[in-house]
């Protein structure tokens, strides 16, 4: 009998990947994904702990779901198994069980390969099953092969966890220590994805460029070597990776940007702040100049590399002069796109108890100033493409009839009137208009080009 499974996913792409793998694990038990929680036999909230009030959002969602669970029971339509997964579950598992005893399962990111056992336990017993272990075995060795195709653009988790311990961040506590999957396992998964129609793979990891795994040749590989091996897979046109730490940008990975045409010219490389004093307080293990030099080397290797980043404003003790250093760094680097956040303290992290916490009004004003600068850079970057041609990999149908959506090599969203047969193809599109977050264009040739044969007609300069 098929059972209905609803998963709500918050947060990063790793969570999106994890949710897809939970669907795979639950498929042999008869669960099939549905689009709404009403009437579902199992509802999983796959949570994120990075943002402020993350746990409160989960509790209010649970309040709503409890009504659906009760309604299903009253209608004698069977039981709704309610689960909380992900990083809030890992960090606040016991609190969830205590405050929301109607939740049946609470489990962390490292345990979902044991879902069949947890479901069996939850079905038998009243009360919640809590599993926030960091098991010795790797879930990647025990998960089933992916059940379905992920589509034209897919994610592949290669690395998980983090050993960096930035003082503001919960990831080392919720995801645990750094772990790299072996290269053979990753290459096999990539080949299966490509056989299922995937043309672009984004390698995922909390600290993805720290990946180092056993290669099929017995040597330890770094991410650059892995990317070169992936580039040999026939039909895989594009490779990306996210998220990286400046300290782990190895020479071979930088060279791969110059030498591997399938590796896309876009890099998410968070710096967080521009002041060395704040970077030290954040335990970032690099200075602002280290980052500048690194970006110079990357741009020497790949002149059209588009930069993306993350920034935190209002870190404890940050002065106006410190913040001015962030604006200076942003102006010098020139970002194609970036995320910026007000610092907010996370229980259990060192920054939550050290340094002077700043008033919200100060954080708000700095965030506004930084966003204005980043938005202006993004708009300038996108406007630089108007009138030029870009190779677009169409990966989705658009909202309007006859429209396809895809991405440029530089991660811009591009939409154009196009035949649905162009889905999954890389097509030359002339950019007619640029908005803050997307480009609109016209298909120039129906001629299908591969990533390696397409020579982009654009040369990019830093936008600032
Ligand atoms: N406060 C604000 N931003 C944070 N981030 C992580 N932890 C915090 C926090 N406590 C941001 C960082 C990170 C991104 C994923 O989220 O910029 O790179
Ligand atoms: Fe968190 Fe990234 Fe720092 Fe690791 S490197 S502690 S994931 S911000």
Image: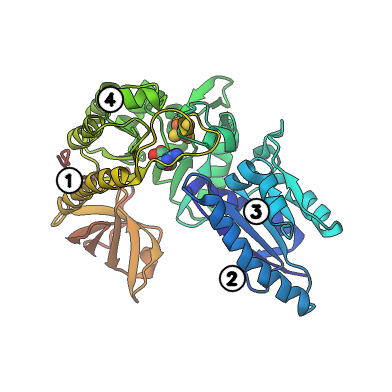
Could you say which disc has been placed on residue 288 in the image? 4
Comes first in the chain, label 1 or label 4: 4
- Could you tell me which secondary element the residue under label 2 belongs to? loop
Q: Residue at x 54, y 38 (%)?
A: 347
Q: Position of residue 317 (x, y in %)?
A: 34, 30
Q: Residues within 10 Å of mark 1 (few under 14, many from 20)?
A: few
- Could you tell me which secondary element the residue under label 1 belongs to? loop
Q: Residue furthest top?
A: 219
Which residue is labeled 1 in the image? 458
Between the C-alphas of marks 2 and 4, the distance is 46 Å
Could you say which disc has been placed on residue 36 in the image? 2
Between the C-alphas of marks 1 and 3, the distance is 46 Å
Q: Residues within 10 Å of mark 4 (few under 14, many from 20)?
A: some
Q: Quadrant of the N terminus?
A: bottom right
Q: Position of residue 203 (x, y in %)?
A: 47, 40
Q: Residue furthest right?
A: 124
Q: Residues within 10 Å of mark 3 (few under 14, many from 20)?
A: many
Comes first in the chain, label 2 or label 4: 2
């Amino acid at each position: 009998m098929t059972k209905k499974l609803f998963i709500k996913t918050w947060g990063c792409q790793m969570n999106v990947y994890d949710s897809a793998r939970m669907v795979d694990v639950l498929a042999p038990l008869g669960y099939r994904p549905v689009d709404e929680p009403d009437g579902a036999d199992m509802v999983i909230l796959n949570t994120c702990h990075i943002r402020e009030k993350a746990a409160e959002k989960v509790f209010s969602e649970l309040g709503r779901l409890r009504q659906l669970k009760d309604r299903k029971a009253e209608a004698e339509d069977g039981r709704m198994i309610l689960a909380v997964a992900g990083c809030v579950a890992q960090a606040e598992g016991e609190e969830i069980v205590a405050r929301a005893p109607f939740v049946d399962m609470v489990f962390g990111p490292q345990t979902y390969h044991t879902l069949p056992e947890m479901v069996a336990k939850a079905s038998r017993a009243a009360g919640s099953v809590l599993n926030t272990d960091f098991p010795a075995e790797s879930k990647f060795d025990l998960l089933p092969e992916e059940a379905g195709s992920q589509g034209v653009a897919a994610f592949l988790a290669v690395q998980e966890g983090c050993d960096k311990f930035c003082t503001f961040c919960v990831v080392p506590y919720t995801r645990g220590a750094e772990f790299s999957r072996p290269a053979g396992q990753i290459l096999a998964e990539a080949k299966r994805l490509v056989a299922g129609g995937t043309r672009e793979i984004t390698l995922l990891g909390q600290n993805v460029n720290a990946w180092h795994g056993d290669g099929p040749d017995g040597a330890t590989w770094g991410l650059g070597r892995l990317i070169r091996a992936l580039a040999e897979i026939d039909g895989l046109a594009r490779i990306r990776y996210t998220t990286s730490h400046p300290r782990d940008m190895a020479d071979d990975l930088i060279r791969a940007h110059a030498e591997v045409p399938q590796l896309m010219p876009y890099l998410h490389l968070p710096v967080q702040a521009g002041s060395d004093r704040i970077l030290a307080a954040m335990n970032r293990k690099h200075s602002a100049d280290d980052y500048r030099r690194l970006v110079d080397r990357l741009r020497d290797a790949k002149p059209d590399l588009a930069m993306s980043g993350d920034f935190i404003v209002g870190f404890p003790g940050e002065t106006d002069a410190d913040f001015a250093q962030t604006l200076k760094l942003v102006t010098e680097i020139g970002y194609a796109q970036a995320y910026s956040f007000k610092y907010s303290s996370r229980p259990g992290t060192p920054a939550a108890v050290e340094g002077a916490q700043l008033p919200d009004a100060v954080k708000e004003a700095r965030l506004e100033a930084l966003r204005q600068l980043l938005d202006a850079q993004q708009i300038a970057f996108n406007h630089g493409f108007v009138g030029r041609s870009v190779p677009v990999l169409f990966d989705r149908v658009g909202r309007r009839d006859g429209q396809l959506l895809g991405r440029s090599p530089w991660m811009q969203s591009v939409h154009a009137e196009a035949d649905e047969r162009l889905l999954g193809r890389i097509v030359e599109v002339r950019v007619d208009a640029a908005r803050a977050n997307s480009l609109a264009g016209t298909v120039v040739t129906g001629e299908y080009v591969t990533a390696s044969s397409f020579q982009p007609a654009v040369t990019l300069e830093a936008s600032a």
